[in-house]
Amino acid sequence: MKSATMKKTVTSKDESPSRLIDARIKELGDWRGKTLAHVRALIKQAVPDVVEEWKWRGVPVWERDGIICTGETYKSAVKLTFAKGASVKDPSKLFNSSLEGNTRRAIDIHEGVEINADAFKTLIRAAAELNGSKKKKAR
């Protein structure tokens, strides 16, 4: 048993974040995997140069000049947490979770709920642009 755990750890370090996200989607095998795959595709469409990461023991993360959002999966929701969401304009009111904080905002997607693809891509682009603008100000 111990060697299997060790092998899994070594494999995780050797595999690319994109492959680990692929594996998570496949492992879920239900509506959560399909939802995660769908929002992942939308993120890549919105920000083609997005970087995929695998952090905090198994959380997909999308970055460009900083974290755009994370994609956590729970029993009843796929949660997309935007690191600087409180500073991102959300005219379509996609944010529906973590609304009380001063920094983050999240979108909880429940089974059977379809996200507005155009509004979501606009939100992703705005979050990426915010990261880029913060980087320019630091120079």
Image (spheres, rainbow, N blue to C red):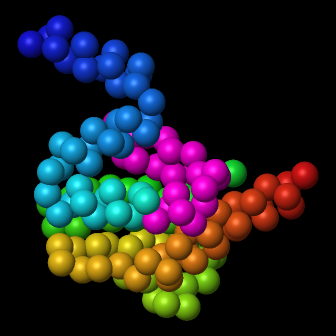
Location of residue 96 in the rendering, given as x and y in whole percent from the top left corner = 37, 82
Residue for point 43% across, 59% down: 41
| Residue 103 lies in the magenta stretch | no
Q: Tell me if residue 116 comes above or below residue 74 in the rendering.
A: below
Residue 25 is left or right of residue 85, and the answer is left
From this viewpoint, is residue 29 visible?
yes
Q: Tell me if residue 127 comes above or below residue 136 in the rendering.
A: below
Location of residue 82 in the rendering, given as x and y in whole percent from the top left corner = 50, 65
Please report the bounds of the magenta region as a residue range. 42-64
Location of residue 71 in the rendering, given as x and y in whole percent from the top left corner = 38, 56
Residue for point 18% across, 43% down: 27
Residue 18 is left or right of residue 57, and the answer is right
Residue 34 is left or right of residue 38, and the answer is left
Q: Which residue, as the protein is rendered here, is positioned at the far right?
A: 139
Looking at this view, is 110 or 102 the one in front?
A: 110
Image quadrant in which you'd find residue 80: bottom left
Quarter of the image for the N terminus: give it.
top left
From this viewpoint, is residue 95 visible?
no
Residue for point 54% across, 63% down: 45
| Residue 56 lies in the magenta stretch | yes
Image quadrant in which you'd find residue 39: bottom left
